[in-house]
Each structure stands twice: as structure tokens, then as C-alpha cells.
Image (tube, rainbow, N blue to C red):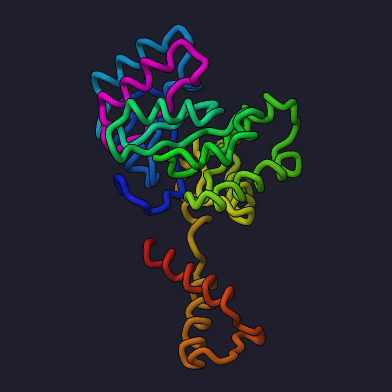
């Protein structure tokens, strides 16, 4: 896995903090990033014990992200302190709502640590532009399940289209990495995982949260350029090079600057793969 750099991660795999021994297996799954989860995966009565487990025995601590409990909880301060002590790669901030919360997190972390706000509430969504602007924020994450609960929404597609598009737009305006879409809870249904991932990609998302290792390879593949896309991109770049700035057609369609830039982007992604 890449460390503190700007390479875009496509898959993020949660590991319960109470099962910290699973971290090496999570990396072996092919996940681009591993998130040690102190929040949803840990019962309230086990929060302190889970934090102690991470403090004592987190493998590759400087290569993992840690999801902390929300700023309005009693566990937040100690969670963030732990992240700083372990020099974690970054912090996933549950139910992030204000830039002040994120700046406080940043103040407890070593230089270069990543901050990834989880947009899970109406208030958090209302502040996405200011959340993106906080120094250290690499990209936004969309907590689709909690978001539905907070707004009383029943449904994960058309019902959330406005909000997903808003998160993509805010990310682009702030010049942070494309956002990360939320989880698909149906672990067994690989078709659903694939469909959800392609849907997020079409909307402009650049990654997805995963809750099981078997989701990883599929998510990575969905976000990677296909062989047909790579071949098309190469034809466009080659044709544009021959034309030397002149008008050119590829597959019967005019190639202008936006088309060329898209093709070049596909080829850059293919090189990273």
C-alpha cells in the first residue's frame, strides 16, 4: 500500500479494532487502504478495551487509517490521541460536521497525516465545502447508511443522488481527491457490489468503502480502466499526436481537447495499475 502520497486509493477495507490481528490479512486482500474501526464495529461497552488492543498490538500502525468515534462522543478525544501516538497514516473522522473539529484532529497528529471526513449527517453535508478546505483533508467519504438514518431517507440510489453529486462537486471545487462512496452491506451479492461501484464511478466517485475482503478485488477492478477503454484512449492519443493540433476523428467521433484529456487520464490510471 502507498504511504503518505497522492496516489488515489480505490478500496478501503474496515477491520474491527477488536480483531486487530486481522490487519495483515486485510492488507493481503489487495485493499488499497485499511481502516481500523473504533466506531461502528465496536460496542459501547468495549470501546476502551478496543482502543487498548490497538495501542498494544496494531500491526503496521503507520500504514493504517483509524476510524475514530464521532466528535460528540465521550471516546473521541482519547481515540484521536491514540492516532497521534501511533503516528497512524490518517484518521477517518466519523460524523464530521465542522472545520473546527477537523482542525482539532489535525493538531493532534504528526505532519503529513491524512484526514478523511465521513459525511454522515445533514449538518456535515451542509458544511462539505468548508470541510474540504481544512489543511490535511485528502478526500471526503460518504457514510450512506448513517446519512439515510439522519435524514429519514429510505433508499440508496435516486434518493441519495443529489447528495452524492454534491459531494463530488464540492471535492472538485476544493481540488481534493475524488470522494469515496459508502458501503454495500450485502456481502454475498457480488452483482450488487459491482453495480453499486460502477454507479459511484459514473457519478464521479474515486473509491469505495468495503466491509469484507471478498469485495476488494471487484471494487478495484470496477474503478480500473477496462481493456477497451485503454485501447480507445491509446487510439485517441496516437491520432492526436499525428494531427499535431489539427482536427481529428477517432471511431467516427471528433476528438477535441476534453476528449484528449480524458484519454490521457485513462492511460495514466492504467500505468498505476
Q: Quadrant of residue 27?
A: top left
Which span of residues is magenta-colored? 61-87
The foreground one among 132 and 198 is 132
The foreground one among 240 and 170 is 170
Estimate the x, y position of residue 119 in percent, counting from the top left: 57, 33
For the image, the number of numbered tags is 0
Residue drawn 48% across and 44% down?
A: 139
| Outermost top residue | 45
Estimate the x, y position of residue 255 in percent, counting from the top left: 60, 82
Residue 218 visible here: no
Residue drawn 60% across and 81% down?
A: 256
The foreground one among 222 and 44 is 44
Residue drawn 30% across and 14% down?
A: 52
Q: Is residue 64 above or below residue 58?
A: below
Which quadrant: the C terminus?
Answer: bottom left
Q: Is residue 105 above or below residue 72?
A: below
The foreground one among 217 and 269 is 269
**For residue 3: magenta?**
no
Estimate the x, y position of residue 97 in percent, counting from the top left: 56, 28
**For residue 81: magenta?**
yes
Residue drawn 65% across and 45% down?
A: 166
| Left or right of residue 43: residue 60 | left
Q: Is residue 141 above or below residue 195?
A: above
Estimate the x, y position of residue 120 in percent, counting from the top left: 60, 30
Residue 6 visible here: yes
Amino acid at each position: 500500500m502507498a504511504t503518505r502520497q497522492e496516489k488515489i486509493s480505490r478500496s478501503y477495507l474496515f477491520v474491527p479494532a477488536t480483531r486487530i490481528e486481522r490487519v495483515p490479512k486485510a492488507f493481503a486482500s489487495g485493499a488499497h487502504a485499511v481502516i481500523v474501526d473504533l466506531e461502528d464495529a465496536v460496542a459501547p461497552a468495549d470501546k476502551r478495551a478496543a482502543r487498548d488492543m490497538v495501542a498494544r498490538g496494531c500491526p503496521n500502525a503507520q500504514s493504517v487509517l483509524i476510524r475514530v468515534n464521532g466528535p460528540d462522543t465521550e471516546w473521541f478525544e482519547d481515540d484521536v490521541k491514540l492516532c497521534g501516538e501511533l503516528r497512524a497514516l490518517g484518521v477517518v473522522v466519523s460524523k464530521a460536521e465542522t472545520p473546527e473539529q477537523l482542525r482539532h484532529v489535525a493538531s493532534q497528529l504528526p505532519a503529513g497525516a491524512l484526514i478523511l471526513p465521513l459525511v454522515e449527517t445533514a449538518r456535515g453535508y451542509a458544511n462539505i465545502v468548508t470541510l474540504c478546505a481544512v489543511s490535511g483533508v485528502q478526500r471526503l467519504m460518504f457514510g450512506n447508511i448513517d446519512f439515510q438514518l439522519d435524514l429519514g431517507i429510505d433508499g440508496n440510489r435516486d434518493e441519495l443522488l443529489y447528495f452524492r453529486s454534491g459531494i463530488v462537486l464540492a471535492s472538485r471545487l476544493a481540488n481534493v481527491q475524488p470522494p469515496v462512496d459508502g458501503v454495500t452491506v450485502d456481502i454475498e451479492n457480488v452483482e450488487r457490489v459491482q453495480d453499486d461501484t460502477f454507479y459511484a464511478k459514473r457519478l464521479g466517485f474515486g473509491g469505495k468503502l468495503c466491509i469484507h475482503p471478498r469485495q476488494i478485488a471487484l471494487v478495484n477492478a470496477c474503478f480500473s480502466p477496462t481493456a477497451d477503454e485503454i485501447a480507445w484512449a491509446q487510439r485517441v492519443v496516437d491520432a492526436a499526436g499525428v494531427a499535431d493540433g489539427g482536427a481529428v476523428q477517432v471511431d467516427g467521433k471528433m476528438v477535441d481537447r476534453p476528449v484528449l484529456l480524458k484519454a490521457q487520464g485513462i492511460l495514466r490510471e492504467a500505468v498505476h495499475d
